[in-house]
């Protein structure tokens, strides 16, 4: 069973850019635009990028084991109709076979995808968090 609703999956599969949020060692937030992919079979989002292990976001996730991502857009400006999905949860900085930040949802909030806003907590198997290979 998917952690995402059918509306969320349809929306996510039609988008390619999101913004990941991490927290630095001094507690300051860091937000960066990223490319990503949803892996519905595993119930995770994987963030990729060029030389990802050298980035602040990768180091932050390796240190804290936490991240959030927002994927959103405007379906219309007149009338104003924003829509999107926010995913918060445990995260892994995976180095091999290819570097990704893997986000395991704990909280999913979506808006503008159906008749009502959706916000819920998600329970999944606990992954290893921090930095590791494979």
Image (cartoon, grey):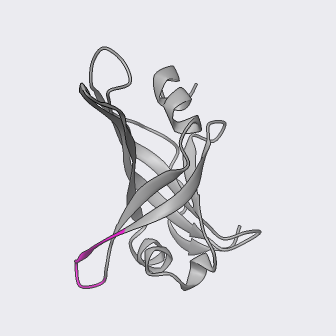
Q: How many marks?
A: 0
Q: Is residue 90 above or below residue 115?
A: below
Q: Is residue 127 above or below residue 48?
A: above
Residue 105, x across and y down, in percent:
44, 45
Which image quarter is the N terminus in? top right
Q: Nearer the viewer, residue 102 or 54?
A: 54
Asked if residue 104 is among those painted magenta in the image, a careful observer would answer no
Q: Residue at x 71, y 67 (%)?
A: 134
Residue 132, x across and y down, in percent:
62, 74
Q: Residue at x 59, y 36 (%)?
A: 13
In the figure, is residue 59 to the left or right of 96?
Answer: left
Q: Residue furthest right?
A: 97
In the figure, is residue 39 to the left or right of 22?
Answer: right
Q: Residue furthest front?
A: 78
Quadrant in the rendering for residue 72: top left
Q: Is residue 93 above or below residue 113?
A: below
In the figure, is residue 27 to the left or right of 37?
Answer: left
Residue 103, x across and y down, in percent:
50, 54
Q: Residue furthest top?
A: 115
Quadrant in the rendering for residue 85: top left
Q: Is residue 6 above or below residue 12?
A: above
**Magenta extent:** 25-31
Q: Residue at x 45, y 53 (%)?
A: 18
Quadrant in the rendering for residue 60: bottom left
Q: Residue at x 57, y 54 (%)?
A: 36
Residue 59, x across and y down, in percent:
47, 80
């Amino acid at each position: 069973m998917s952690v995402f609703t059918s509306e969320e999956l349809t929306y996510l599969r039609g988008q390619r850019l999101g913004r990941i949020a991490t927290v630095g060692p001094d507690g300051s937030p860091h937000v960066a635009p990223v490319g990503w992919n949803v892996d519905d079979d595993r119930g995770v989002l994987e963030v990729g990028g060029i030389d990802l292990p050298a980035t602040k976001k990768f180091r932050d996730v390796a240190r804290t084991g936490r991240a959030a991502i927002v994927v959103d857009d405007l379906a219309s400006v007149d009338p104003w109709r924003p829509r999107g999905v926010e995913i918060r949860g445990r995260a892994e900085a995976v180095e091999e076979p290819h570097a990704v930040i893997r986000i395991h949802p704990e909280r999913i909030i979506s808006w503008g995808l159906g008749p009502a806003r959706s916000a819920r907590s998600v329970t999944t198997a606990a992954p290893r968090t921090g930095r590791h290979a494979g």
